[in-house]
Image (cartoon, rainbow, N blue to C red):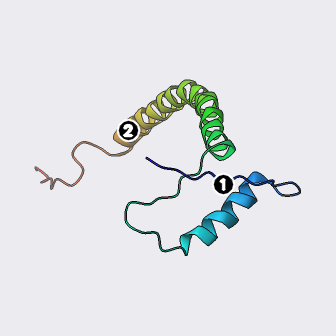
Amino acid sequence: MREIRVSANTEGRSLGEAIADIKQRAAGLALPAGYSIDYTGETEDMVESFGYVMQPLAIMFSLPLSLVVPVVYTYLDDLGALFVRWWSRKTPAHAGQTTTASR
């Protein structure tokens, strides 16, 4: 496999801005069959490090939720049970049935 490496100095601009410009201009290129453009080096490191940042954040947010959700669910379940008990006392079991008065 042959490759051509292109490097540039991005002084005064962030790496993200420079890569966005390069990708925009490269999108307009008509590459022959079998040719491709790969972004490596610091760009690859930047994308990879973003993944490393997201993993701890996901754990940091999921741990508190895993502790809070069961408590909230239990509270809501108890609240639902209270509602059912209240409703059953308020509504007689024979509601809706027709009664005949006996003399």
Say which amino acid is labelled 1: Val
Disc number for residue 84? 2
The residue tagged 1 is 6
Disc number for residue 71? none
Q: Name the residue: 75% across, 54% down.
A: 8
Percent across and percent down for residue 90 are: 38, 44
Q: Name the residue: 48% across, 27% down.
A: 74
User: Horizontal placement of 60 versus 85: left or right?
Assistant: right
Tell me which corner region of the image, top left, top right, bottom left or bottom right, holds residue 81.
top left
Q: Which one is nearer the viewer's eye here, 33 or 2?
A: 2
Which residue lies most toward the right here?
12
Say what secondary structure mark 1 lies in.
Answer: loop
Q: Name the residue: 38% across, 38% down.
A: 84
Q: CA distance from mark 1 to mark 2?
A: 71 Å
Which residue lies most toward the front here?
2
- Residue 20, compared with residue 43, is above or below; it is below
Percent across and percent down for residue 85 are: 39, 34
Q: Residues within 10 Å of mark 1 (few under 14, many from 20)?
A: few
Say which amino acid is labelled 2: Val
User: Horizontal placement of 17 versus 38: left or right?
Assistant: right
Count the marks: how many?
2
Q: Of label 1 and label 2, which has the lower sequence position?
A: 1
- Residue 8, compared with residue 76, is above or below; it is below
Percent across and percent down for residue 43 are: 66, 47
Q: Residues within 10 Å of mark 2 (few under 14, many from 20)?
A: few
- Residue 24, compared with residue 54, is above or below; it is below
